[in-house]
Structure formats: structure tokens, C-alpha cells
Image: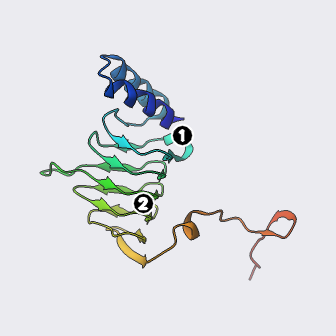
């Protein structure tokens, strides 16, 4: 839902329509408790988890195509630096992650929940922790963003682990 508000707001901002983008920004803030300015760049196919609750994105940040941004994610600057994060395509940013400063995130990256990313991340990696460290390289992103619920054949009851 927030992505649709952003797209409309971004279109108006690019076409120099006065006043309305600022009004829509405040409506977004009231409805979703999120700060996603019209001036940031978010690629096609990207989406916010749970309507984008509590997401903060810097006005100059660039986010690639087909990204997933979880709740309570901050993509922002750092004191003393003009540069802001640039995020590649097919990046999954889990809930609570913080990406701060002049950081470049590669393509096909999975950023774990509550990770604090302050250094560049290469393509095809999994990062997590405070500060974020590379946990796996040369990954297939589809292995990390697919469904985590497993089913037994045609039975729709989820598989539960054996109790010890």
C-alpha cells in the first residue's frame, strides 16, 4: 500500500507539481508511520512488508528493482557524509535492519533482521549482525526468500519438527 502512495508522490515530484507531494508525504507519515520522501528512487517491483510500517528512507537513497523492505527498516545517511546508501536489485532487507552511510549493497543480497550495515556488501551475499558481517557468499537469493512453510505432499497441514 505504501509503495502505491510513494509511486504517485514520486510521479508528482518528478513533474514539479507544487505542494501536493508534501501533503501526500504527511499523509503517508500519519497512515504508516513511515518517512519515504518522493525524491528517493525505488525501482519497479520493489515492495514493503506489512504496508511499510515504520520505514525510514533518506531523500537521496537509491533502491533497485524487485527489492523487499521489511518493517522498521532505516536506510539513511551518516553524520559528516554527503553520500547515502545505494541498494542493488533483488535485495531482501529483513525487519529492523539499518543501512547507514555511504554504503553500496550489491545485487541478490539478503540482509538479516536487525543487522546494522555500515560497509559495502558485494553481490550474492547474506549479511547479518551488529555490525553486519558476511555470513554466506555466492548464494542463490531464491533459496532465502522462498516460502519457509513446508507441506507434506497434498496434505495442507504444515510439517512440525519432532519434539525432543
Q: Earlier in the sequence, mark 1 or mark 2?
A: 1
Circle 1: element type: helix
The image quadrant where one finds the C terminus is bottom right
Q: Residue furthest right?
A: 155
The front one of 161 and 108 is 108
Q: Residue furthest bottom?
A: 164
Q: Residue sitting at 76 percent across and 79 percent down?
A: 163
Q: Residue sitting at 52 percent across and 72 percent down?
A: 140
Give the image quarter of residue 24.
top left
Please rate how many residues cluster around mark 2, counting C-alpha atoms within 10 Å: few if below 14, some from 14 to 19, many from 20: some
- On residue 13, which mark appears? none
Residue 23's x, y, as percent? 37, 20
Q: How many marks?
A: 2
- On residue 114, which mark appears? 2
Residue 78's x, y, as percent? 20, 52
The image quadrant where one finds the N terminus is top right
Q: Is residue 122 left or right of residue 164?
A: left
Residue 65's x, y, as percent? 44, 51
- Depth-wise, is mark 1 or mark 2 nearer the camera? 1
Circle 2: element type: loop
Q: Which residue is mark 1?
A: 51
The front one of 78 and 62 is 62
Q: Relative to residue 135, is residue 106 depicted above or below?
A: above
Please rate how many residues cluster around mark 1, counting C-alpha atoms within 10 Å: few if below 14, some from 14 to 19, many from 20: some
Q: Residue sitting at 34 percent across and 34 percent down?
A: 37
How is this picture coloured? Answer: rainbow
Q: Residue sitting at 44 percent across and 59 percent down?
A: 91
Mark 1 vs mark 2, CA separation in Å: 18 Å
Are discs 1 and 2 less than 8 Å apart at CB?
no
Residue 84's x, y, as percent? 24, 50
Give the image quarter of residue 128.
bottom left
Amino acid at each position: 500500500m505504501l509503495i502505491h502512495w510513494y509511486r504517485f508522490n514520486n510521479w508528482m515530484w518528478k513533474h514539479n507539481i507544487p505542494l501536493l507531494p508534501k501533503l501526500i508525504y504527511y499523509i503517508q507519515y500519519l497512515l504508516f508511520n513511515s518517512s519515504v520522501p518522493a525524491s528517493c528512487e525505488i525501482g519497479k517491483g520493489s515492495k514493503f512488508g506489512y504496508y511499510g510500517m515504520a520505514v525510514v528512507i533518506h531523500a537521496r537513497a537509491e533502491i533497485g528493482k524487485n527489492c523487499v523492505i521489511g518493517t522498521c527498516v532505516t536506510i539513511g545517511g551518516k553524520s559528516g557524509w554527503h553520500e547515502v546508501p545505494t541498494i542493488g536489485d533483488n535485495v531482501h532487507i529483513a525487519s529492523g535492519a539499518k543501512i547507514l552511510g555511504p554504503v553500496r549493497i550489491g545485487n541478490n543480497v539478503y540482509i538479516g533482521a536487525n543487522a546494522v550495515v555500515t560497509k559495502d556488501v558485494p553481490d550474492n551475499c547474506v549479511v547479518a549482525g551488529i555490525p553486519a558481517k558476511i555470513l554466506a557468499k555466492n548464494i542463490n537469493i531464491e533459496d532465502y526468500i522462498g516460502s519457509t512453510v513446508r507441506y507434506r505432499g497434498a496434505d495442507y497441514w504444515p510439517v512440525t519438527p519432532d519434539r525432543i
